[in-house]
Image (cartoon, coloured by chain):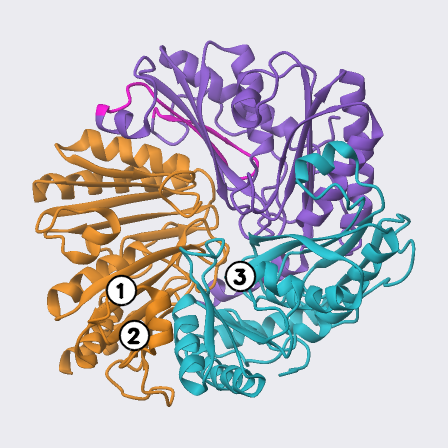
Chain colours: A orange, B cyan, C purple
């Protein structure tokens, strides 16, 4: 609870100091920098199912007992009576890396990750993430942790009207990253994302050359994305090497994205890598 | 707060510059409420093939004798020499439910329904619907009925910059709804749609719990949509129960969508359910 | 802060007024007419890999020695050590027809063409095109030629807030058009594109009836596009007939697109057909 409050205060301060521009349709992060709202409150909007919201038009919900009709249609393991739901118009990487922290911190499992082609007119994805839990309090907690973490994982997302860059890194991948990207459990894992996709190819090449890493995956507009205009490169290896590869790619990405549009390239919240 | 201010300023500036109603890129219904134009006129734009337009950047066309080259590529039953065409940038449900009325009212069949990922920067679909008819007057009449009905079926579409909600209901499903959603012919049938998709999951659960209905389908960003950021729940049952389920979902949807954006949540035209 | 707000307001107004200003989200050609930048310069942004940019948020890059990790993941023929990369937020046809000229003019091959669902909130595609070459100077030259040609091939692209039209024609198709559309090598080849897709159907019928041409392909929102709201018709034949078919379709397209939005329908650069 105290941590929640601190998070919210921090968010307010960031907002007052001038967050990123909201609603730019071509930018990947249209919502203003802000702390998740209504976290921990049972009824921020009068519905007990509502948990809170976060940057990127991200919403968090919980259903204590999923209706059997819906449960069957969603093809979720019947043992999970309760589900936590994260949905966002903008972003997939930030929410998935945030959900990975939630899996580590709670007694829940990520049972479904689907990527919409969205970003509100931008080049990337939106997402739908579902946590399964046997107990509703675990599902709710998983959603709360995710909403809080999104503030951090938006830190290395950079957008302009021409495209966007995204970088994520974790020292130890868990279930959400394994499910979404095939990340090896317990290993250091990172992704580089560039849009338009040509920039993403360059980021992948830069990361691969910058340090000794092992490629896990490569997704492009026609293969592995939801027709987003991105190339996503995912890799693992020694944690120092993985970080170094991300940082090298980030430098190149900023330089290239700047050639397409004069807007300043700044973090959506605060860089964390 | 900041968004509110920008919206107000924007309205003032547009007024001063004498522009038309703005088309919010993230809203599912960018066109202002207006009656279909040029309906029934043979040559609203000088082309006999033009039938008219409707809300949602919807256009209606008719081809009396489809060229054999095209007929073959479109894989339409050769017995239909004439086709009526409905295309829209924003919306799929409204046009499909409208086309269902056209099928009931005319001697035509819906031969093709395809959903684009569109909504002009929003989270949903656009659509292409083709009617087949042996006689051109039937094809034209089907298009006319559809364009007129879209005004009504946009009534329970609600959009904000953060997402949208859509609800449709009919007491008796016909060929268009059967083709698009597998609706049982002659039965009451309804859909709930929520974007971002997390809200759509909640609507489905609410509808399923509110009354005794039978699920027909469930579509999500990765299954059954064109990567739209929606969950679509479709169901049938006793007409009173189906209606009751829709109304319960609509109340919950408005409450949840409001947590993401301060914009007023209002009907695109006039609610009909 | 105040400057931020004013800048954003101006951007929103320009966007919502939907004129010929850059970045209109519903228009297929957001960038203003301009010459490709930094062409031929080795380091327009300080990176030797950067070749230049062009209209449509198009960027051109070159990698002299693709990292083996990436090379394998991209599934490119190993004999091509060097690759040239074209990426764009807006457009696919213009870049593909431009790349076709590059293939004719250089010792390179198009090894990959992928279409994103993009156009920055519009109805169409963005693209990723990769040239393979044994020598880096060939890859670079292919990218340069493409960036230069895009200025021409954007000439018969016409956009309004309601949709767009595109027409392309070549007297002699080469490897890029063969790979992307199955165009017969060495033959006259053209495409008509209309969005919303209903207009594209009409363009196809008009072209097919206007002259004796042979259909090569037909792509629609649900078949052959990346869920774009377009119908793309491709055809070959006698060069005079192919041109005549395109011109007839162009006239009809402008008339129809005008029924959906009052904006002037003008060429993105200068018509070439």
Say which chain tag 2 marks.
A
Mark 3 neighbour class, 10 Å CA radius: few under 14, some 14 to 19, many 20 or more: many
Rounded to the nearest angstrom, the CA distance separating label 2 from label 1 is 9 Å
Point out the frontmost of discs 1 and 3.
Answer: 3
Q: Residue B90: percent from the left, percent from the top?
A: 62, 61
Q: Provide the residue designation for mark 3.
A: B122
Residue drawn at (18%, 32%) of the image: A210
Q: Quadrant of the C terminus of chain C?
A: top right
Mark 2–mark 1 CB contact (< 8 Å): yes
Residue bounds of the magenta highlight: C48-68
- Label located before the other in sequence (2 or 1): 2
Of residues A252 and B28, the one nearer the viewer is B28
| Callouts 1 and 3 in the same chain | no
Q: Could one spot residue C12 in this view of the protein?
A: yes
Q: Provide the residue designation for mark 2.
A: A36
Q: Is residue B2 magenta?
A: no
Image position of C149 with respect to C135: above or below: below
Residue drawn at (70%, 35%) of the image: B72
């Amino acid at each position: 609870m105290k941590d929640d409050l601190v998070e919210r205060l921090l968010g307010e301060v960031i907002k007052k100091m001038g967050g990123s521009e909201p609603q730019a349709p071509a930018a990947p992060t249209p919502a203003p920098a802000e702390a998740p709202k209504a976290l921990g409150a049972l009824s921020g909007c009068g519905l007990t199912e509502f948990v809170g919201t976060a940057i990127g038009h991200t919403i968090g919900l919980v259903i204590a007992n999923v209706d059997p009709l819906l449960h069957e249609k969603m093809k979720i393991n019947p043992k999970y009576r309760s589900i936590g739901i994260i949905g966002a118009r903008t972003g997939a990487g930030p929410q998935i890396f945030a959900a990975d922290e939630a899996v580590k911190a709670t007694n829940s499992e990520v049972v479904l990750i689907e990527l919409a082609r969205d970003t509100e007119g931008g080049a990337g994805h939106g997402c739908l993430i579902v946590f399964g839990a046997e107990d509703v309090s675990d599902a709710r907690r998983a959603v709360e942790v995710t909403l809080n973490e999104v503030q951090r994982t938006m830190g290395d997302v950079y957008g302009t009207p021409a495209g966007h860059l995204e970088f994520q890194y974790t020292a130890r991948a868990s279930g959400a990253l394994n499910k979404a990207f095939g990340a090896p459990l317990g290993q250091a894992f990172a992704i580089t994302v560039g849009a338009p996709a040509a920039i993403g190819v360059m980021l992948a090449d830069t990361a691969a050359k910058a340090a000794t890493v092992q490629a896990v995956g490569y997704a492009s507009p026609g293969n592995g994305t939801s027709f987003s205009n991105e190339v996503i490169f995912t890799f693992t290896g020694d944690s120092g090497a993985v970080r170094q590869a991300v940082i090298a790619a980030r430098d190149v990405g900023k330089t290239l994205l700047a050639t397409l549009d004069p807007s300043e390239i700044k973090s959506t919240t605060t860089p964390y890598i």
